[in-house]
Image (cartoon, rainbow, N blue to C red):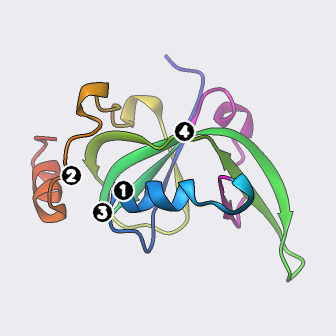
């Protein structure tokens, strides 16, 4: 059994793996991370090999390894958490996920597997087809 935990988060405003990957590669100042209101209570487990799994159009399609957490104070004076993420973006098997707010913990045994290296460059299925196949458990 793994000693780490993962996070899962909706990727709002992004329509594909390729679009998210391009956004990550263009990150200003080389900072790759996501700022969130809540500080994860299971910080120690996240930093023992956890990843942030991205839900794109209702389907988990990718992940990034979590490399750290840092405090960020917003212009409003509120403490937030920047989840520091590694590159590259890793394509995963598609897994259906219902909408939710914020992020959720994801146990390693419930996380979709990475796609084999040989399949990482395959063309993406149309979102409707990928969603339907995920719903019936084919992918």
- Dot 4 alpha-carbon crowd within 10 angstroms: few under 14, some 14 to 19, many 20 or more: many
Residue 30 sits above or below residue 4 on the image: below
User: What is the x, y in percent for residue 20?
Assistant: 44, 59
Please give the residue where the numbered disc 4 appears in the rendered image: 51
127 over 94 or under it: above or below: below
Where are the magenta residues, as a range?
Answer: 32-51
Residue 38 is a magenta residue? yes
Q: CA distance from mark 4 to mark 1?
A: 19 Å
Q: Which residue is mark 3?
A: 58
In the image: residue 112, left or right of residue 4? left
Residue drawn at point x = 46 percent, y = 30 percent: 108
* Sequence order check, earlier mark of 3 and 1: 1
Circles 1 and 2, Cβ within 8 Å, touching? The answer is yes
Residue 110 shown left or right of residue 29 in the figure: left
Occupied quadrant, residue 127: bottom left
Residue 109, image x, y percentages: 40, 29
Residue 91 picture location, percent across and down: 36, 41
Q: As rendered, which of 87 and 103 lies closer to the eye?
A: 87
Q: CA distance from mark 3 to mark 1?
A: 16 Å
Tell whether label 1 touches label 4 (CB within 8 Å): no
Indicate the secondary structure of the residue bearing disc 3.
Answer: loop
Residue at left offset 33%, top offset 49%? 61
Position of residue 63 in the picture relative to residue 139 (left or right):
right
Nearer to us of marks 4 and 2 is: 2
In the image, residue 128 lies at what x, y percent?
13, 64
Residue topped by disc 1: 18
Q: Residue 124 bears which disc, if any?
A: 2
Asked if the residues shown at circle 3 and circle 1 are in contact, with their CB atoms under 8 angstroms apart, the answer is no
Q: Circle 1: is it few (<14), some (14-19), or many (20+) Cα within 10 Å?
A: few
Q: Residue at x 51, y 62 (%)?
A: 23
Instruction: Compare marks 3 and 2 and give the one earlier in the sequence.
Output: 3
């Amino acid at each position: 059994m793994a000693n780490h935990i993962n996070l899962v988060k909706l990727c709002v405003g992004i329509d594909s793996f390729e679009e998210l990957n391009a956004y990550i590669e263009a990150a200003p100042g080389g900072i790759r991370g996501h700022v969130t209101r809540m500080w994860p209570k299971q910080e120690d487990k996240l930093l023992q090999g956890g990843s942030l799994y991205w839900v794109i159009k209702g389907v988990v399609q990718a992940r990034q390894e979590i490399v750290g957490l840092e405090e960020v104070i917003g212009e409003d004076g509120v403490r937030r958490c920047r989840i520091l993420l590694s590159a590259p973006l890793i394509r995963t098997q598609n897994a259906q996920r219902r909408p939710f707010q914020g992020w959720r913990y994801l146990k390693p045994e419930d996380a979709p597997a990475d796609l084999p290296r040989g399949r990482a460059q395959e063309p993406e299925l149309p979102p409707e087809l990928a969603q339907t196949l995920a719903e019936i458990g084919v992918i």
